[in-house]
Image (cartoon, rainbow, N blue to C red):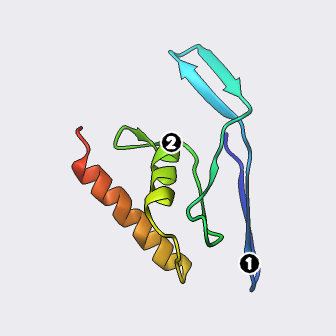
Amino acid sequence: MTAEVAILNKAAVALAADSAVTISSGSSQQKIFDSADKLFELSTSVPVAVMVNGDMNFSQAPLPVLIKDFRGKIAGDFRTVVEASKEFLSFLTKFGVSSPQ
């Protein structure tokens, strides 16, 4: 189970996520790792982040890899969180359309 917390006030948002992840192989074998990343910076120049839980794949690609690819390709000078989210969702849409399924 993933625990994610977002604390908001008028000036900022603080994000936190646990680092445990359970990997299952079949119905009875489970392995728990306590070193998973679930919180990722969306930009190198502004403090915008993405929290991930559940299935960490999009169109059969790992979301952490896609987020880091987005961060490297986009300038990241977003004026608002809405602008950042639209850019990221557009990036994912383009990736989904072009990826082999």
Label drawn at residue 56:
2
Q: Residue at x 44, y 65 (%)?
A: 74
Whole-number angstrom distance, CA of label 2 to CA of label 1? 26 Å
Sooner in the amino-acid sequence: mark 2 or mark 1: 1
Q: Residues within 10 Å of mark 1 (few under 14, many from 20)?
A: few
The residue that mark 1 highlights is 12
Q: Between residues 17 and 35, which one lies in front from this camera angle?
A: 35
Q: Amino acid at mark 1?
A: Ala
For numbered disc 2, what is the local secondary structure? loop
Q: Is residue 8 left or right of residue 24?
A: right
Q: Residue at x 57, y 50 (%)?
A: 52
Q: Between residues 67 and 12, which one lies in front from this camera angle?
A: 67
For numbered disc 1, what is the local secondary structure? loop
Q: Residues within 10 Å of mark 2 (few under 14, many from 20)?
A: few
Q: Is residue 85 left or right of residue 28?
A: left
Residue 96, placed above or below residue 46: above
Q: Amino acid at mark 2?
A: Met
The image shows residue 71 at horizontal and vertical percentages of: 51, 59
Label drawn at residue 2:
none
